[in-house]
Image (cartoon, helix red, strand yellow):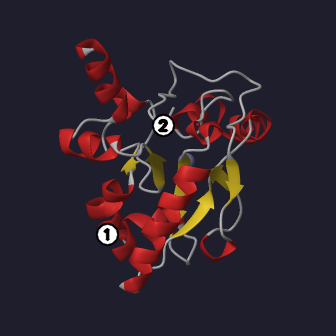
Amino acid sequence: MYDILVNKEYGLPEDYIPNDLIEIDKKYSIKGMAKKEACEAFIKMVEDALKINLHIINESAYRSYERQKELYDEEYNKKGNKANDTIALPGHSEHQTGLAFDLCTDTHNMYEFENTEEFIWLSKHAHEYGFILRYPKNKKDITGYNYEPWHYRYLGDLATKVYKSNLTYDEYYKKSSKEI
Ligand code: ZN
């Protein structure tokens, strides 16, 4: 279940709700829930970062189909088809899996996150906790989305393999399912 692929091609049923969502500790999160194992890995990662005075917080984790629909409609009304570069259609958001986290520092400025020490640390260490950067720079033709330095996806043990492959998760998933 932790290796599920959700992208523009593969979606989730409207009524899909992860079975073990828990509230993320408010010390490290504005709001939200995530699957238990992902949540525990997130807390461990954030607490290790804190030991070297880096402040990582969760801005958004699990989102229901209905919530994603509201966000999508809002963005579509503003931008039309361009909305599809930045936000997933309902049923196609990784946030519905309960395994995706939008991370930031305590400034809450997502668009500056890339230039922070916290981001640099995550780039080197997130995979050790089971997370990968899901929408890397210059990969829109593969992932379908603009670069998102804040969006991390929990993959558990698989994260290190994906990280070392230098592939997007979409590519890695296709490649590994062919090999099986
Ligand atoms: Zn996200």
From this view, report whether residue 140 is shown above or below residue 52: above
According to the picture, the residue beneath numbered tag 1 turns out to be 121
Q: Residue at x 38, y 64 (%)?
A: 114
Q: Earlier in the sequence, mark 2 or mark 1?
A: 2
Considering the image in quadrants, where does the C terminus appear? top left
Residue type highlighted by circle 2: Tyr
Asked where in the image residue 63 lies, by quadrant, the reply is top right
Q: Residue at x 29, y 29 (%)?
A: 172
According to the picture, the residue beneath numbered tag 2 turns out to be 2
Tag 2 secondary structure: loop
Q: Mark 1 Cα within 10 Å, few/some/many (few <14, many 20+)?
A: few
Tag 1 secondary structure: helix
Q: Mark 2 Cα within 10 Å, few/some/many (few <14, many 20+)?
A: some
178 relative position to 99: left or right: left
Mark 2 and mark 1: Cα distance apart in space? 23 Å
82 relative position to 47: left or right: right
The answer to which of 106 and 109 lies nearer the viewer is 106
From this view, report whether residue 49 is shown above or below residue 66: below
Q: Which residue is drawn at 47% across and 57% down?
A: 150
Asked where in the image residue 97 lies, by quadrant, the reply is top right
Q: Position of residue 44 (x, y in %)?
A: 46, 68
Q: Which residue is drawn at 34% across and 76% down?
A: 117
Q: Where is residue 138 in the image (x, y as percent from the top left)?
A: 30, 41
The answer to which of 22 and 86 lies nearer the viewer is 22
Query: Total marks drawn?
Result: 2
The answer to which of 55 and 159 lies nearer the viewer is 159
Residue type highlighted by circle 1: Trp
Q: Where is residue 30 in the image (x, y as percent from the top left)?
A: 68, 68
Q: Position of residue 32 (x, y in %)?
A: 70, 57
Is label 2's Cβ within 8 Å of ligand 1? no
